[in-house]
Image (cartoon, helix red, strand yellow):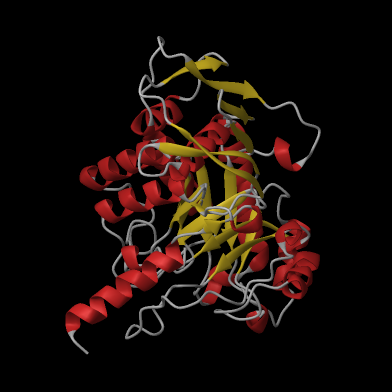
Amino acid sequence: MDGRIKLYLLVTLLTCLISGACTGKSGQEEVNVYPIPQKLELTGDWVKIPKSGFRIEGISHPDTDAVNLLKQSFQITEKAKQVISIRQLDMANDEMLRSGAYTLDITRKGIDIGINDDRSLFYAVQTLSQLIKNEKEIPVCSIWDYPDIVFRGVVEGFYGTPWSFENRVEQLRFYGRMKMNTYIFGPKDDPYHRSPYWRVPYPEDQAKNIHELLAEAKRNKVDFVWALHPGMDIRWNDVDRQAAIKKLESMYDLGVRAFAVFFDDIEGAGTDASKQAAFMNYLKREFVDKKGDIQQLILCPTEYNKDWAKTDYLDILGEQLDPFIHVMWTGDKVVSDITHEGLEWVNKRIKRPGYAWWNFPVNDYCLVHLLMGQVYGLDKNTASDMCAFVSNPMEFAEASKVAL
């Protein structure tokens, strides 16, 4: 087959995979919104975007990032007759009280956006920008949308070449568009995340990059989680406890407000469940509690899948680990389906909803393949069984977007 034809077919396939289509009743014109909202009602009518633009009314000081995004799609001026009204949601429905939940109503009179927080407005504007047809029209419609899972996104946790700074910037922007709110920085081949330099602060140039990534994450409403991986050579003593605190302090000074500690893929003294629990509880007590603004503290355990859970390791974590600390889980195997039964099994042992780490589309175990095929193996009825869902991608950042 001619190479140009192959390329054309690939681009066509990826376009179909990435685009999400929502249709109204009786074959009304299709609109593309992705991720697909929880509820979308189309009337079949379209309204022209006024050349004079819109003026913003409602809550004072709406989120700057959302307003800047809005200005990329519409002319915003105080003199416009048409109004974009932004108001606080007033709903008893639990789902609509979640961070990021929003309502969006488009009529011939204007646009009404109901929000809970800054993330809600940012997501509503992302949806609104996708509804524009030919830069001229938007559909008359009503949308209710909310996240199924509190934390959702990506863990850069693969073996191989870590993503570049430019890759990560583009990924964070992609997560904002896809309404993902979590990015965990934990590439196995970053020596300052793992051995030999986990006790050492990042060099100035790398620290500057992380600081800039944090700003990009904030603009896209993504929680940037930095992960420490000390288990290969940790000494369970006060010297290493203080070294860990000092490293976390250095990351906090860069702007990090969510943290993880990985004890995966190690052997020897570092695998002790009681000592891991005591170490994590120490970080919670002496760092998280004293800071007062840490959003997440996550543990990736050594026995992180059912195949490897041959001891009382998980039960010890469940008994001894502070309830604030999340526990990651890949499923029945390292690369596994995520099922209700599997999560139910581990949740009983760790005594909290699992933090799902899905090893797809990561390909560090099959490097000759790009994993860009159909996604399967995810039980859609597991939202209440987990506190989070993050996907581990390939070292090929752009190719990973298809599965993400």
Residue 312 vertical placement versus 195 (above, below): below
Q: Is residue 306 left or right of residue 253?
A: right
> Residue 279 versus residue 404: which sits nearer the camera?
404
Residue 179, position as x, y percentages in the image = 51, 47
Tell me if I can see residue 402 in this picture: no
Location of residue 191 by image quarter? bottom left
Residue at left offset 60%, top offset 71%: 330
Residue at left offset 75%, top offset 61%: 385
Residue at left offset 36%, top offset 44%: 134
Residue 377, position as x, y percentages in the image = 61, 77
Location of residue 79 by image quarter? top left
> Residue 241 versus residue 343: which sits nearer the camera?
343
Residue 333, position as x, y percentages in the image = 61, 81
Give the residue at the far bottom of this rendering.
1
Please state, as top left, top right, bottom left or bottom right, where the N terminus lies in the image: bottom left
Residue 203, position as x, y percentages in the image = 24, 47
Residue 307 vertical placement versus 291 (above, below): below
Residue at left offset 54%, top offset 32%: 121
Q: Is residue 298 left or right of residue 312?
A: left
> Residue 345 versus residue 376: which sits nearer the camera?
376
Tell me if I can see residue 82 in this picture: yes
Q: Is residue 108 left or right of residue 4?
A: right
